[in-house]
Image (tube, grey):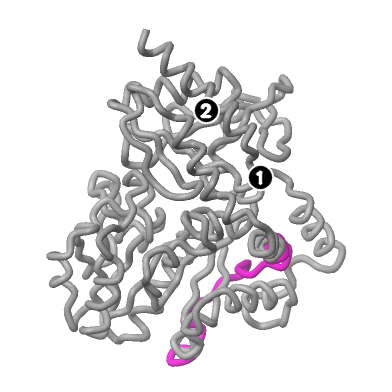
Amino acid sequence: MTSDFLAYQAQTTPHPLAMEVSHAEGCYVYDTNNKAHLDFVAGVSACSLGHRHPKVVQAIKDQLDKYMHVMVYGEYIQEPSVELAKLLAEHLPKSLDCTYLVNSGTEAIEGALKLARRATGRSQIIAAHHAYHGNTMGSMSVMGYEERKQAFRPLIPDVDFIHFNNKEDLNQITPKTAAVILETIQGGAGFIEPYDNYLTKVRTRCDEVGALLILDEIQPGIGRTGKLFGFEHYNCIPDILVTGKGLGGGMPIGAFTSSKAMMHTLQDAPKLGHITTFGGHPVIAAAALATVKEITESNLMAEALKKEQLFRKLLVHPLITDIRGRGLMLAAMTPSAEITNQVILKAQNRGLILFWLLFEPKAIRLTPPLTITNAEIIEGCQHIISILDEISS
């Protein structure tokens, strides 16, 4: 299987981890030797409720017994997607009451950028240095890492960049700006939180010049930071909200949400302003609906903040220089990329799944399922400390 994987399946890096998966359950992934691997990554923040959560699995099975894909998005009334959009609206501010369901986070970013330009009649998009919003051409255009973009230029025009958390840069937002797009918490850059009311100041500046604010919650959204949406921590309501990853509970999904009036601009002049065949797929929407219900009706979000404190208490070591992030969106920082690499690779041999962040080589990703237990956190952190002791000796 390994040789076929390398021969026939396109790869993203020269050296994939290449663990051959047998099955997964709860917070564990099992390889084909039936070795259990405690999952501190959750499919890169996607498996909110762990692997094969019973309510998500049952929702998928129930929907499979009714119908799968029947019509291109937006034409037929399909209960799972309608109920999902309604449930999101019930948990969002009144100005965010209409959701467009798509297939991935990066597709949702594409839709949000199109919506901003269509709604404002302006073209300039302002993004942040060190930002990551996906890897399709529009999303790459608002990525803040030139070394990742240069091989694929030209990208979409009229995109400019500001520095996250730098209030002086906000003067670059002008009446020519269609939208500012920011991650609520910068992910690939190292789980950088906004501080000193930064997002509130961005919101104010956008209002002053008539620009829209797009907040990318693909990673921090759906309970990961201890609230359903990360922006709830920072006194800032976006005009367009983008979600994905954890929304599907392990199934592929993306969504962008705005006001009904704004979303209406994609319906006409021209018609079909944004279309997708499989967006809002009933099986995926059923999984997402079960996921959001479980997160909002349980105490998982409150527990995420308590579990954050447990991680911070346990991960104390001379080779851990900082722990960034909030809730169960955490990154343990080491003094060097070499140390981080050793920790992640040695952890796999010990049955602990860790991973990197995209652009911060010293960060160890800690984004387990929201359902992880305190005992599992203790077990995984003991492995990390043991590995760091081994590296120190």
Q: Position of residue 3 (x, y in %)?
A: 59, 23
In the rendered structure, the answer to whether residue 376 lies left or right of residue 206 reads right
| Rendered position, 12 above or below 138 | above
Q: Position of residue 111 (x, y in %)?
A: 44, 72
The residue pinned by badge 1 equals 50
In the rendered structure, the answer to whether residue 224 lies left or right of residue 127 reads right
Q: Residue 178: which numbered mark, if any?
A: none
- Helix, strand or loop for disc 1: loop
How much space separates mark 1 and mark 2, taking CA atoms? 18 Å
Magenta region includes residue 270: yes
| Rendered position, 214 above or below 271 | above
Q: Quadrant of the C terminus?
A: top left
- Residue placed most toward the observer, 330 or 66: 330
Q: Are marks 1 and 2 in contact (CB under 8 Å)?
A: no
Magenta region includes residue 44: no
The residue depicted at 31 percent of the width and 86 percent of the height is 120
The residue depicted at 54 percent of the width and 81 percent of the height is 98
In the rendered structure, the answer to whether residue 228 lies left or right of residue 158 reads right
Q: Where on the picture, by quarter, is residue 172?
A: bottom left
Q: Position of residue 141 (x, y in %)?
A: 30, 60
The residue pinned by badge 2 equals 381
- Helix, strand or loop for disc 2: helix
The residue depicted at 40 percent of the width and 27 percent of the height is 316
The residue depicted at 42 percent of the width and 63 percent of the height is 233
Query: What segment carries the magenta color?
Result: 268-287
